[in-house]
Image: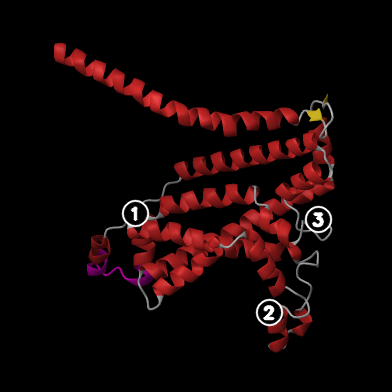
Amino acid sequence: MEHIGERIRMIRNLRIWSLIFLLPGLALFIYIVVLPTIQVINSSMYNWSPGQVGTFVGLNNFTQMFADPSFRDALLHTFVLLIGAMIIQIPLGFIFAYLIFRRYIGSAFFQTVFFIPMVLSSVVIALLWTQVYNQDFGLLNSLLRAVGLGDLTRPWLGDSSSSLISVVVVVGWQYVGLYMLIFLAALQRIPHSIFEAAEIDGAVGVRQLKSITAPLVIDTLKLSVILVVTGAVQYFNLIWAMTQGGPANSSSVLASYMFIKGLQESRLGYAGAVATVMLVVNLILAIGLQRVFRREPLELG
């Protein structure tokens, strides 16, 4: 009995010390994440600008926001960006990771090349792709003219019908290297003996990829989807540097809409309402995806 009592005291002390070590990080999280979030949600109930006392307006900011066509356009464009980023980043990231994992000739070189966009600032990437999309001397239009498709040339960022998809392509290109590394790390954790056993059983090439490799990285795929979704909802830097949401709001997203309302028009309460909607959208998408992934697990083939 004395031994059991000593063990209980040790467990209790361990829990107390664990809580003590967790408190500084928890306090910091509350101070820099929880409290500012509560403050932003609270500000969304007020009509206020810098240097002025806020006036409580309840849900009026939200009513105005949902009635604004520009907000609805920004919300739609955000979901287009989300879907486009997912279509580009995850498949290409996995393909590049798999090719590098199989150690084809030049794989180390391409691993570095694919990751380069991740170490460049968004402003540098925006300037680079603005030149690519230039109507007069840009690489894209020059290539189209060279292959006899001059009728397809256009001011890609200056045309409301092509500005959004042009930006989506750049956002996808920028983060392919990140998901390549994530998938590559997942592939490298798979024991090599599994692949050897699969080859002995005749599972090679596409069959091995489908039956062995893909199921073993499914958890990484789920994580990548959540990262893409939550990142796309709050994406801002590159879009603002390339188009500032234009022309005519054709490439605006929720983050750029919030920036315009908050910092250009000085409607901080209204911007707080937009930020609150972004938070809710992110939470709904993240929680919804987690529930979907938990309900539909993939089994090893």
Question: Which of the two labelled residues, at mark 2 and mark 1, occupies the earlier sequence position?
Answer: 2
Q: Amino acid at mark 2?
A: Leu
- Residue 263 at x, y percent in the picture: 79, 44
Residue 200 located left or right of residue 290: left
Q: Which residue is mark 3?
A: 249
Whole-Å distance between the Cαs marked 1 and 3? Answer: 46 Å
Q: Amino acid at mark 1?
A: Leu
Above or below, 174 relative to 46: below
Residue 299 located left or right of residue 145: left
Above or below, 25 relative to 5: below
The answer to whether mark 2 and mark 1 are in CB contact below 8 A is no
Quarter residue 185 falls in: bottom left
Secondary structure found at label 1: loop
Quarter residue 5 falls in: top left
Whole-Å distance between the Cαs marked 3 and 2? Answer: 25 Å
Q: Which residue is mark 1?
A: 300
- Residue 255 at x, y percent in the picture: 71, 47
On whether residue 203 falls in the magenta region, the answer is yes
| Dot 1 alpha-carbon crowd within 10 angstroms: few under 14, some 14 to 19, many 20 or more | few
Q: Which residue is mark 2?
A: 139
| Dot 2 alpha-carbon crowd within 10 angstroms: few under 14, some 14 to 19, many 20 or more | some
Whole-Å distance between the Cαs marked 2 and 1? Answer: 45 Å
The quarter of the image holding the N terminus is: top left
The answer to whether mark 1 and mark 3 are in CB contact below 8 A is no
- Residue 261 at x, y percent in the picture: 80, 43
Task: State the residue at coordinates (62%, 28%).
Answer: 35
Which portion, as a residue range, is magenta?
A: 198-207
Above or below, 13 relative to 239: above
Residue 233, numbered circle: none
Q: Nearer the viewer, mark 1 or mark 3?
A: 3
Q: Nearer the viewer, mark 3 or mark 2?
A: 2
Secondary structure found at label 2: helix
